Image: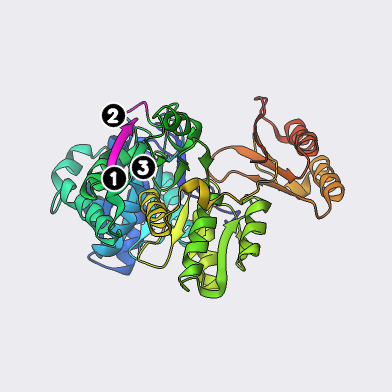
Amino acid sequence: MASPTRQLFGTDGIRGIAGEFPLTQESTYLIGRALGHDRLRRNSSARVVIGQDTRESSGWIADQLAAGLISAGAEVHSAGVITTPGIAYLARAGKYDAGVVISASHNPWTDNGIKIFSGDGFKLPDAEELIIEKEIFSLLQGSGFRAAADKTQTAMRTLPGESSLRGAYIQWLAKGAESGLSGLKILVDCANGAAAAEAPELFSALNLKSTFLSDKPDGRNINDGCGALYPERIAQAVTMGDGSFDIGITFDGDADRALFSDERGLVVNGDGILLLAARDLQSRNALPGSTVVATTMSNMGLEAALRGSGIRMLRADVGDKYVLEEMLRSGAILGGEQSGHIIFRDGDATTGDGLLTALRVMEIMVRSGKKLSQLVADLKIFPQTIQNIRVREKLPFAGVPEIQQAIASAERELGTSGRVVVRYSGTEPLARVMIEAESEEHVNAMACRIAGAIQNTLGDGASISSRLKPIQ
């Protein structure tokens, strides 16, 4: 579980509005300097590879971060625009001491973030992030900033070059893909993000019949009405293809996750992907312990479907780094989130990878001879609503009587026939209320009561947003 003492790092790195703390020119420079010192304590010749998504602010943030790293004595290489899992791959394959991605994933273009991977390709542990964070605050107090963009441009090395670094990742994906995919016709939404720099080249190398949407980023259109935040868009586009598409694939801004549409235009989320992937691995005696790791947000229907196939489902905290931690503890090789972060540990992957997930799903379709709709046909989804409440502060829910009473009341009413999950977002100032039950009426009423209690006590005055996932 994420440490409550960290102030900058959330469940997926440092995130905020570009140009505002902690993503000002000064703070990003000092984040780079603190990271450089941390890496140099481990290796006096530390090397760091940096990549970025397509946001307007990603370039200057990458420059300032690199300047801070260089000022600390680290050697910096740039991979240019690349997906988050692409940097994770380069960090380990290139024997770097760290990999850094400038991205805010699914957030709007005005936001940005800094994600850090160790040289082994894994996201930094919470304890390590806390050490770096303490130095960042210490440097801020000492005001050691200087604008060093010009120095960065001359000092950064791009060996062997941006396209070559990105190309190495694409080649790794293509090399690991099974043959026989060329018969598929696919529709792909790149979210005007990092996937636009990789997906066309990858799918072309595999001779897939690919049509692309949202593949022309302009710095401000990332995630704008497209991508994994709006899976209904790819689903609708599939249905307009006169039955010619076998599958629709949609990525988020940094392509560490993917969602899908089946050939009928129905959305298949991460729960569906976990189900079909787990069954495929189980059928090949390649699922150690018959175990899969999901999160507290995964639907009870997934758990029931897996149980029917003799597969155990463990639940981790939300955040793919926590899914991975549970996978490493339990020995599971498959885990993921409903949002589409899927981690395959039967190969070299160390984080959720949307492109890899897309390849695996298509491989399973070809290997089984089944359509995507057939692979998830028996997944019965319990009605589930998720309400988001903007909060002014993140106090422990147990310490706010009104909230605790609303949660306890819902849990008593549901008993064993449903679930209540109330948590804070690790990347935004939001409280999330998830209710799952057999009755849609109960789901909505209970969620509204809990959300209202949070709004009354911790809300910042903004309206509550919700989304309902009915039985499919």
Write the residue at 48% across / 59% down.
277
Asked whether, in this view, residue 299 is left or right of residue 34, the answer is right
Q: Which one is earlier in the sequence, the residue at label 1 or at label 2?
A: 1
Q: State which quarter of the image contains the C terminus.
A: top right
Query: Which of the two discs, 3 and 1, sits closer to the camera?
Result: 1
Residue hosting label 3: 28
Can residue 456 be seen here?
yes
State the separation of the CA atoms marked 3 and 1: 19 Å
Q: Which one is earlier in the sequence, the residue at label 3 or at label 1?
A: 3
Q: Quadrant of residue 254?
A: top left
**Residue 46 at x, y = what percent?**
25, 63
Q: Which residues are magenta?
A: 208-221
Colouring used for the render: rainbow
> Residue 216, which numbered label?
2
State the separation of the CA atoms marked 1 and 2: 14 Å
Please determine whether, in this image, residue 94 is positioned above or below residue 261: below
Element under label 3?
helix
Q: Is residue 108 magenta?
A: no
Task: Judge the density around disc 2: few (<14), some (14-19), many (≥20) Cα neighbours within 10 Å.
Answer: some
State the separation of the CA atoms marked 2 and 3: 27 Å
Residue hosting label 1: 82
